């Protein structure tokens, strides 16, 4: 006989928590996915279009119904446009995260980045040299300000190509040039993709897909690469770390705080606050044996690779981590954060805190993090988490599920 | 008894041409719209979502099926995200058109804009002053280069707000500031909208709609306003004009050239070529009594308001204009150009020319216009149009349909 929920996930901790969630009458992503079956075949194949108000249109893949939208676009055009907009959304998301980091770098450079530092000054100088930013006779802050300014140019439309594309092999750069897909500006390629995919603009699937390549490169060699480099400069370049993972990393006798999202600007400050003597003493006074910070999803990874912080779960198990009833607080910034999380949390004592000005969620308390208030705000929310320890009810942590990865 | 196609359109010329199109077995936007009925109610109401690959999802408006997508987004969030992406596409399109004009202004300023001129130097100076661009002791070209550079900053992310927002009344600016919807950069707001509407980012319909306002303002007081100002500077500020309209403006005994799209960068040069002595003589030698340039859609309007050029039709009648069989050439740039046009044209002698590097169409010949080759390319294509006059077969122009607007 199969174990319960064995077909839902291969993770034993998730199987156990799916049972608990069912007992607690908590709806999870698994049930919502089931309820959506069968998913619309037109939308799934990219054969439907609502890019203009003459639509919505759909093309019949079996050749019996209409083969063209109202404007005359056929299946190839419609699919290419839909894929193009998916690329635009992905490129915009990664790159907008990169922009936030560049903003912090600029604030640190101008002396307004309270609490943030230049943790890898060598990398700062190396990247500044790539951007042609003068470093001689300048201190780290001046270099940071200059680099942030230069990186912002990559987001604009004054350049013929983004800067870090020069890292690609010469032969590859030549190929991209010949195809006309060398990205000029990060936001520019996203905007042009949204333009091209509008009604009556680009109606050639090859031309659309080539711009998709350009838009993707504007992120891969632009926004995403900038995000990585600036994260390393601000928070330190990662090294191999030993860590533990799965929901069993939650501690029965400690204050459990989970960070979720993408932006180390929030999670690094929360880690700092959670390790402060003041908060550790407060935790002790509340009967907790410490403060246990763990991550889920990508922010978890940021903390893991820089500080060895444990990973409690992945994107799909974020609701299940809450359903343990053992989490005092989950802090979120943006990307991959299910809007259902606060509903799950409301069945327990867990406090849900949203932190970004560009991502709010139903039922969450909003405590906005900005460079100038980040250190202070992190202390405020960690204090709330610690004070919430007393409210924990019956909790279930599948402790046997914890796995460990040694130094590798 | 109703007249044929009376329910399809109130325009008599279109009614007559719909009859001809039916006789010629030409499929038009009317038939394609009919074939799409009934349109998908989920897509039409914005209740479906395919922003991530856990979907596609749909919310049942009658409350019987699922009320949430797989991620947990409810109807309010899904509708707000879909509207947000429509705003992003519209803002990106208008603004990308504005960017093309700024590029031409910059080329003219640097002496590479062969054929283009500064037609309204007074306006150039006025707008330059608004942008804080120095004008004292500088010639028009230097000012144009400086203004183009300053306008490109509006597309970037270094500013706290776009420049022309200062034209709004102070009270209105204060309201926008208080709501946090003052646009910072044109492309930036579009990119942020694509980011916010991705899975797990902004999940608050009010927050999403407020960013929709910011994104729309980034176009309305940014890209679109820049497009208008730069068009006036390059092509002259429009004045009230007498003109004629409807498909009867096509001439039975002249070479008919139609321009279609949005970008005066193409249409102005084509007008210039069509009025050249060389082309008029060529037309005469081919038995035509002249060259009749007419517009459809927005490019038609650009020529109408600056030169009184007649309007042969609107967006919906573009196929019907071709179905007269009296058009030697239609030139298109981008926006609102149905990909069906070349199919219609292929039933007659009409040549279809696409001109923009960012918009290609099935079955069209591609002759790319750039500032440095625009004058020459315009002569080339007009020559092809004139030479095509001899290939015209039986044509039907509903001449009685022509209407006129006097000086107003």
Image (tube, coloured by chain):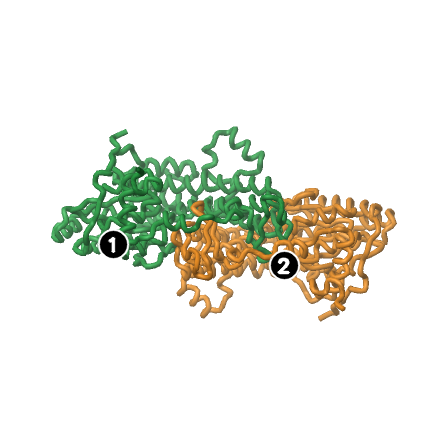
Chain colours: A orange, B green
Q: Residue at x 74, y 48 (%)?
A: A345
Name the one closer to the observer, B28 or A15. Answer: B28
Name the one closer to the observer, B264 or A319. Answer: A319
Q: Is residue B243 left or right of residue B233?
A: left
Can residue B219 be seen by looking at this rendering? Answer: yes
Q: Pointer 1: what residue?
A: B350
Q: Is residue A65 left or right of residue B268?
A: right
Chain letter of the residue carrying label 1: B
Q: Nearer the viewer, mark 2 or mark 1?
A: 1
- The percent coordinates of residue A253 (x first, y second) are 85, 54
- The percent coordinates of residue B57 (x first, y second) are 58, 52
Q: Pointer 2: what residue?
A: A232
Can residue B188 be seen by looking at this rendering? Answer: no
Q: Residue at x 70, y 64 (%)?
A: A7
Q: Is residue B384 above or below residue B187?
A: below
- The percent coordinates of residue B303 (x first, y second) are 29, 41
Tag 1 secondary structure: loop
Q: Residue at x 49, y 54 (%)?
A: A85
Density class for disc 1 (Cα within 10 Å; few <14, some 14-19, many ≥20) is many
Chain letter of the residue carrying label 2: A
Rendered-image quadrant of the C terminus of chain B: top left
Rendered-image quadrant of the N terminus of chain B: top left
- The percent coordinates of residue B344 (x first, y second) are 30, 54
Q: Is residue B138 above or below residue A60?
A: above
Q: Is residue A330 left or right of residue B40?
A: right
How far apart are the alpha carbons under marks 2 and 1?
A: 59 Å
């Amino acid at each position: 006989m199969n174990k319960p929920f064995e077909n839902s996930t291969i993770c034993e901790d998730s199987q156990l928590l799916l049972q608990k969630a069912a007992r607690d009458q908590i709806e999870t992503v698994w049930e919502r996915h089931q309820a959506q079956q069968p998913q619309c075949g037109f939308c799934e194949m990219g054969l439907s279009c609502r890019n203009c108000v003459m639509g919505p249109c759909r093309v019949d893949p079996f050749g019996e119904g209409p083969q063209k939208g109202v404007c005359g676009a056929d299946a190839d055009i419609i699919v290419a446009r839909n894929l193009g907009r998916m690329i635009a959304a992905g490129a915009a998301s990664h790159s907008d995260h990169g922009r936030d980091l560049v903003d912090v770098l600029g604030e640190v450079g101008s002396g307004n980045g309270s609490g943030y530092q230049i943790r890898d000054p060598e990398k700062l100088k190396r990247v500044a040299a790539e951007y042609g930013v003068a470093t001689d006779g300048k201190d780290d802050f001046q270099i940071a300000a200059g680099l942030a300014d230069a990186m912002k140019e990559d987001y604009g439309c004054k350049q013929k190509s983004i800067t870090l594309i020069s890292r690609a092999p010469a032969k590859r750069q030549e190929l991209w040039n010949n195809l006309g897909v060398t990205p000029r500006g990060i936001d520019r390629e996203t905007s042009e993709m949204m333009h091209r995919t509008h009604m009556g603009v680009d109606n050639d699937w090859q031309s659309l897909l080539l711009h998709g390549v350009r838009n993707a490169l504007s992120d891969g060699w632009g926004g995403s690469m900038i995000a990585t480099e600036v994260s390393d400069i601000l928070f330190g370049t990662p090294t191999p770390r030993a860590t533990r993972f799965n929901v069993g990393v939650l501690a029965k006798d400690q204050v459990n705080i989970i960070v979720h999202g993408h932006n180390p600007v929030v999670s690094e400050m929360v880690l700092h606050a959670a390790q402060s003597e003041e908060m550790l003493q407060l935790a002790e006074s509340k009967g907790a044996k410490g403060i246990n910070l763990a991550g889920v999803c990508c922010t978890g990874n940021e903390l893991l690779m820089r500080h060895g912080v444990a990973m409690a779960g992945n994107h799909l198990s974020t609701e299940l981590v809450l359903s343990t009833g053992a989490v005092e607080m989950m802090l979120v910034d943006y990307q991959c954060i299910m809007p259902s999380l606060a509903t799950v949390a409301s069945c327990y004592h867990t406090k849900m805190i949203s932190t970004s000005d560009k991502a709010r969620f139903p039922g969450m308390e909003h405590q906005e993090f900005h460079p100038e208030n980040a250190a202070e705000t992190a202390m405020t929310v960690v204090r709330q988490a610690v004070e919430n320890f007393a409210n924990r009810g019956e909790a279930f942590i599948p402790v046997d599920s914890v796995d460990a990865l040694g130094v590798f």
